Amino acid sequence: MKGSLPLVAAVLAAVTLTVHAQTPAPMTPESLVKSAKRAAGDEYAGTFVRICVAPDNEGGPGRGAAGRGAAPPANRAVPDRARWYAKPYKVFDNLYFVGTKIHSSWALTTTDGIVLIDTLFDYAIEPEIVDGLKTLGLDPRRIKYVLISHAHGDHDQGAALLQSRYGAKIVMGAADWDATLQRPASAPGGVPKRDVVIGPEGTKITLGGTTVDVIATPGHTPGTLSYIFPVRDNGRSIVVAYAGGTAFNFPRRAENFAIYRDSQRKFAAAGAAAGATVVMSNHTEFDRAYDRVRIAQLPRATGEKHPYETDTATVQRYFEIGADCAEAQRLSMQ
Ligand SMILES: [Zn+2]
């Protein structure tokens, strides 16, 4: 991340100048998009492209429910396994990747059991999560909590199975529970029973001495949840900021962009307060999870960081992408 230091210095200098001059430049959609592009750099270009260059809701209102990531039709074909199947990997001392090439699912291990974060499409649950945990020497019966970042099929279709088979508690935002419970019983993966409901105030979930700070970040869906939690890298504690919803596939209205923008800022502030130096997302295109989890298997030179570890400034820059792109869209509608 050496390349980012001049940028950080430049941003700090710009902020200092602005404060001294007391005449901040007016924000325009164009200046915000430029600022988001700068914030993304090469590292997070995928996020910038998805929400600033070609946002999913560009076509206008009405695409929300049917946008990318929404639950696919019940009779859809399972995609070719070669396109999505990924092997499971131990990535930190206490965090294991059991996702696909496209979507992430993570097992956070504690002395009292497993917190599973996100659950993939139904076809991937057995091969990736159930078999993946076993391959890694973990017992899926030890899953105590399943955190659903938001109620779209690519992240939540495993919830019902993990609840009914292993007795895991399913944690979801209140509005996303309401949406989930309206699904027909024939929905892919089934429908979980209402379990742990998280309101706008969020909550903290502690298991075996590990606490996950669950933060309500409405925007992508009304009940989107994001997480802050500690992992260990060869015994050293590092804090992760896990973004629960990224794409703009909600109805294209100014107030929705404002909600999204405010959630990004709120989560960035929580990440700063916790000293987060890792960004994770539930789509591998945003945090390059499928590359990073494999790079994490390689031996490291002395002093070389974990491939997921950045620094607190980079984590802040990541959430500026979402805030700036959302604000650019909101301003362009006025
Ligand atoms: Zn989604």
Image: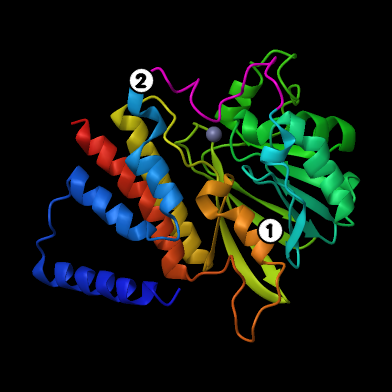
Say which mark, if any, is on residue 61: 2
Query: Magenta includes 305?
Result: no
- Under mark 1, the amino acid is Thr
The answer for how far apart the CA atoms under marks 1 and 2 are is 38 Å
- Across and down, in percent, residue 202 comes to 57, 45
Q: As rendered, which of 296 and 179 lies closer to the eye?
A: 296
**On the rendering, which quadrant does ligand 1 occupy?**
top right
Q: Mark 1–mark 2 contact, CB under 8 Å?
A: no
Note whether residue 229 is visible. no
Magenta residue span: 62-78
Left or right: residue 317 versus residue 113 is: left
Q: As rendered, which of 93 and 292 lies closer to the eye?
A: 292
Q: Secondary structure at mark 1?
A: strand
**181 in relation to 125, above or below:** above
Query: Magenta includes 66?
Result: yes
Q: Which residue is mark 1?
A: 211
